[in-house]
Image (cartoon, rainbow, N blue to C red):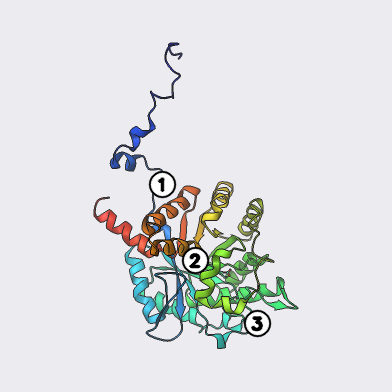
């Protein structure tokens, strides 16, 4: 159909006024393309040895390391707020760290005890256990080290033992975060052979060598063990995007059920590319440094912390993430519940 010559072409101002759809809160809600819900959020937690202790993590305002007895009520709140899962990170007592990370596959280690306690009390809350050796090594690297090199193939057996140990304690999802080559296949086979064919594997498939992990390393104590060393021989170079697709392809072939991109906001392009290329459940990790930036600015009164947090989490959904690991998961889910109750 052609329009009379004196009229502007269809699809242009003033026929089209995009602002009409933004006029009211209800029109904005009606046409919103994405929404954040509690089921999209996973809370990472730091588990402390001992009893009745809680330690604030200075570089992560609002985050505490908790002993198992203190973790249980927090986990209960997570379940009540609709979070599907939490991710556990142990703060290993320094005396238990060794060159060979043997504490990683001690079935009675801190994270295994936490998993058993949580599963007994809250069987419907999903538990994600990290598979990497850094909480257990004296040098703070995710793999075994010899002659100053982080060894790939000899680390794989250790990761497999660690994963089987987590699954045996009742962990629902094991999450290799170490970036060794070939670890997803090795972990998958070890789980199957040990009688855990239902245990899920989420691969930290595209994990970058990022400076945004700083506060996390303070929280778990690996900043001290790692010292001035870095993880650039196994974590990815931030300059690379295509390489993330190759990493994901390998992990999918090796049996990953879900894949993760980490960190989050500086890598939204990678999340979108991974989601488009593989159409698999894709998780994003909004890491410690990203959380700390918002909280620190909010403490100064420089940003509206809650609004900025919400905007960032929504950005992950827009980029294609199915779920987001974030230290703001519980506060956000509780706020979403309040808003839903208020009809918003
Ligand atoms: C280590 C691990 C790290 C994080 C999760 N697992 C840090 C690292 O690679 O040194 C970082 C998470 C965060 O910064 O929130 N396997």
Count residues near mark 2 (Cα–Cα under 10 Å), then give few for <14, some for 14-19, many for 20+: many
Q: Quadrant of the N terminus?
A: top left
Labelled disc at residue 288? 2
Q: Residue furthest top?
A: 5
Label number found at residue 100: 3
SS at circle 3? loop
Asked if 309 appears above or below 230 in the picture, the reply is above
The reply to whether the residue tagged 2 has its Cβ within 8 angstroms of ligand 1 is yes
Cα distance between the residues tagged 1 and 3: 46 Å
Give the mark, 2 or 3, whose residue is nearer the N terminus: 3
Task: State the residue at coordinates (34%, 38%).
Answer: 22
**Residue placed at 61% from the left, 61% from the top?**
208
Q: Nearer the viewer, residue 104 or 297?
A: 297
Name the foreground residue: 235 vs 294.
Answer: 294
Label 3 beta carbon within 8 A of ligand 1: no
**Which percent across, then down, holds residue 20?**
33, 32
Q: Tag 2, which secondary structure?
A: helix
Residue 159, percent across and down? 62, 73
Q: CA distance from mark 2 to mark 3?
A: 27 Å
Cα–Cα gap, marks 1 and 2: 24 Å
Ligand 1: quadrant of the figure: bottom right
Q: Nearer the viewer, mark 2 or mark 3?
A: 2
Q: Is residue 196 visible?
A: no
6 lies left or right of 243: left
| Residue at the spot of label 1 | 34
For label 1, being within 8 Å of ligand 1 is answered: no
């Amino acid at each position: 159909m052609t329009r009379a010559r004196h009229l502007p072409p269809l699809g242009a101002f003033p026929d089209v006024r995009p602002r009409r759809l933004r006029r009211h809160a209800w029109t904005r809600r009606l046409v919103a393309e994405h929404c954040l819900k509690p089921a999209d959020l996973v809370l990472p937690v730091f588990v402390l040895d001992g009893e009745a202790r809680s330690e604030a993590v200075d570089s992560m305002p609002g985050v505490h390391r908790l002993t198992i007895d203190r973790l249980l009520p927090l986990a209960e709140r997570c379940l009540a707020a609709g979070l599907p899962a939490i991710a556990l990170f142990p703060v290993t007592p320094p005396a238990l760290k060794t060159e060979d990370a043997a504490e990683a596959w001690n079935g009675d280690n801190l994270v295994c005890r936490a998993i058993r306690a949580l599963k007994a009390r809250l069987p419907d809350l999903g538990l994600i256990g990290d598979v990497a050796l850094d909480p257990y090594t004296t040098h703070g690297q995710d793999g075994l080290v010899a002659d100053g090199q982080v060894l790939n193939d000899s680390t794989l057996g250790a990761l497999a033992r660690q994963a089987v140990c987590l699954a045996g304690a009742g962990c629902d999802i094991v999450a290799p975060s170490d970036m060794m080559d070939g670890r997803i296949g090795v972990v998958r086979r070890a789980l199957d052979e040990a009688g855990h064919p239902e245990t899920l594997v989420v691969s930290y498939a595209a994990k970058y060598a990022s400076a945004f992990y700083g506060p996390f390393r303070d929280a778990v104590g690996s900043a001290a063990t790692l010292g001035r060393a870095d993880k650039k021989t196994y974590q990815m170079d931030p300059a690379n995007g295509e390489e993330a697709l190759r990493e994901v392809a390998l992990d999918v072939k090796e049996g990953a059920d879900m894949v993760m991109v980490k960190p989050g906001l500086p890598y939204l392009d990678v999340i979108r590319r991974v989601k488009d290329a593989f159409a698999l459940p894709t998780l994003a990790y909004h890491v410690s440094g990203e959380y700390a930036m918002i909280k620190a600015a909010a403490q100064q009164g420089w940003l509206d912390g809650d609004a900025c947090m919400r905007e960032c989490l929504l950005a992950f959904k827009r980029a294609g993430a199915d779920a987001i690991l974030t230290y703001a998961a519980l506060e956000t889910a509780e706020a979403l519940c309040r808003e839903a109750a208020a009809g918003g």
